[in-house]
Amino acid sequence: MDQPPLEALPGLSLPLLRGEEHPCPYLPDRQASELYLLTTQIDAAMYQYLMDRGFRRSSDVFYIPRCGTCQACVPIRVPVADFAPSRSQRRVWRRNADVEVDYGPVQDDDEHWELYARYQDSQHDREMLDTRENFTAFLCRSPIPTVELSFRLKGRLIGAAIVDVCPESLSSVYFYFDPDEHRRSLGVFSGLHEIAACRRLGMPHWYLGYMIEGCRKMEYKTRFRPYELWDPRHGWQPGDSGA
């Protein structure tokens, strides 16, 4: 059987393989495809370099969207020194004053799995992540140093954030939470903690993945301001200042 042709991107010597076209999980009536790196031998410094060229990580796979004429997926990051929480974000911080936040290794025990499964049920977005094995592979398999922020209310786990640690940034990987606690806006609360962690560690940026215009699930990312968007021709450019 013939092997599919490899592709290349300017400024990147690593070979890339184009994945099969599939329905876009974010925008209706669109098809999506990605380019995948053919190596998992990527350390944190190399991943920082890749993120600054539009790549992201899922488990031990590194990819960049390449969807024909659609360019809706745009990498987004926050320069943490300039970040100022909005009035709404300050309310979220106060609302969760009773939540204990701990940092540690990524966990896939029964407590975390049960919370993740409940979250997936509430999102109706189970797809291929609906088994314990897939949960572990998705969140716990990483060639990059990765930490978990766990959020507990009176000892009960109500949220977990998976975060990659790179030389110059923290990069948000995934967040899941107790659907019964949706009024707490725990995703926003986690983002504020991740920004605070960047500042403590002297890291200039917090990476949020892709901003996808037209996808309501991704709109929250542009509420952390100011933010920067990646342009393949000019690199990182200022986004909305929030003024």
Image (cartoon, rainbow, N blue to C red):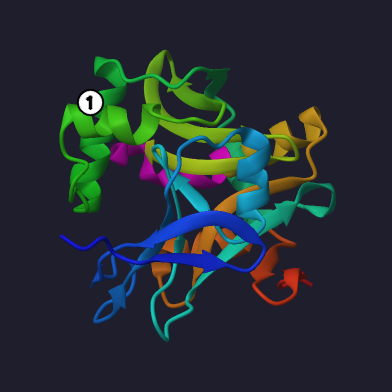
127 left or right of 196 in image: left
Quadrant containing the C terminus in the rendered view: bottom right
Q: Which residues are magenta?
A: 177-190
* Relative image position of residue 8 (x, y in whole percent): 52, 66
Quadrant containing the N terminus in the rendered view: bottom left
* Residue in the foreground of this view, choosing between 152 and 206: 206
81 left or right of 227 in image: right
* Relative image position of residue 44 (x, y in whole percent): 63, 34
Residue at 33% x, 36% y is: 138
Residue at 57% x, 19% y is: 103
236 left or right of 26 in image: right
* Residue in the foreground of this view, choosing between 137 and 61: 61
Could you say whether the residue bearing mark 1 is in a helix, strand or loop? Answer: helix
133 left or right of 19 in image: left
* Residue in the foreground of this view, choosing between 132 and 102: 132
Q: Is residue 90 visible?
A: no
Residue carrying label 1 = 114
Q: Quadrant of residue 168?
A: top right
Residue 196 lies in magenta, yes or no? no
* Residue in the foreground of this view, choosing between 70 and 241: 70
Q: Is residue 197 visible?
A: yes
Residue 188 lies in magenta, yes or no? yes
Residue at 30% x, 41% y is: 179
* Relative image position of residue 113 (x, y in whole percent): 25, 25
Where is 184 relative to 53, above or below? above
For the image, the number of numbered tags is 1
Residue flagged by tag 1: what amino acid is it? Glu
Label 1: few (<14), some or many (≥20) within 10 Å?
A: some
Where is 58 relative to 31, above or below? above
Judged from this view, the residue extending furthest toward the front is 2
